[in-house]
Image (cartoon, grey):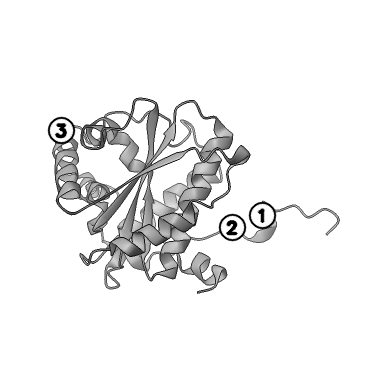
Amino acid sequence: MQVSEAVLSRISCRGFRSEPVPGEVLRDILKRARHAPSGGNLQPWHLYAVAGEKLDGLEADVLARFADHPHGEGSEYRIYPEHLKEPYRSRRFKCGEDLYALLNIERSDKARRRIQFRENFRFFGAPLGLFIYIDRQMQPGQWADVGMFVQTIMLLAREHGLHTCPQEAWAMFHETVARHLHPPPELMLFCGVAMGYMETDHPLNAVRTQRAPLEEFCTFIGT
């Protein structure tokens, strides 16, 4: 698979088959992903790959916590700015509305929206969950490095016929996740990544987010 094909075929998959990801495939992806760029070669990431009964137990605990704390335990960083300006606010709003529309969930139906949101904490049925951590000492430059690492994982997954979904929502329950993974105190949970084989008939996997035209985000000077 060419890189361009992997980029264009990658989506945030929200419906997975239960078929497990072979261990040798996962290890191949991660061995290659470690070559993602990072400033000063800091490699400021740490990853926990969880599957099977361990993942089932972790998800069950987070879902039980979600029942009483639907807004989470408080992430250790602000996932979105407090007052999101345009055009970012409209882009985020449309993304959510397109998802719920495919499930015929009205904006006023808070109960059904909450039920759908909790699917984040089942990794949308994926058999494998990756938890991406960053050292607390790191600065914005290194957060960008972690983003490139995650993107590299997702593109390599496409080479193996796998799909992924990066999920910052997991940061909302970092305390419960930590009780299962026991990360050292210097690590902060950045996001989760669902990985598995796509359930092609799932309605949410038909979503394709709109992207701004080239002229909107790029200024050409001398080219």
Q: Amino acid type of disc 1? A: Glu
Q: Which residue is mark 1?
A: 216
In the image, 188: left or right of 107?
right
Q: CA distance from mark 2 to mark 1?
A: 6 Å
Name the foreground residue: 125 vs 28.
28
Tag 2 near tag 1, CB within 8 Å: yes
The amino acid beneath tag 3 is Asp
Q: Amino acid at mark 2?
A: Ala
- Which quadrant holds residue 28? bottom left
x 34%, y 58%: residue: 99
SS assignment at label 1? helix
Q: Is residue 82 above or below residue 120?
A: above
- Residue 153: x and y in percent read 44, 56
Q: Horizontal placement of 93 versus 104: left or right? A: right
Tell which residue pokes out farthest to the right in this image. Answer: 222
Of discs 3 and 1, which sits in the foreground?
A: 3
Q: Which residue is mark 3?
A: 68
Give the mark toward the camera: 2 or 3: 3
> Residue 204 in the image: x percent, y percent?
32, 63
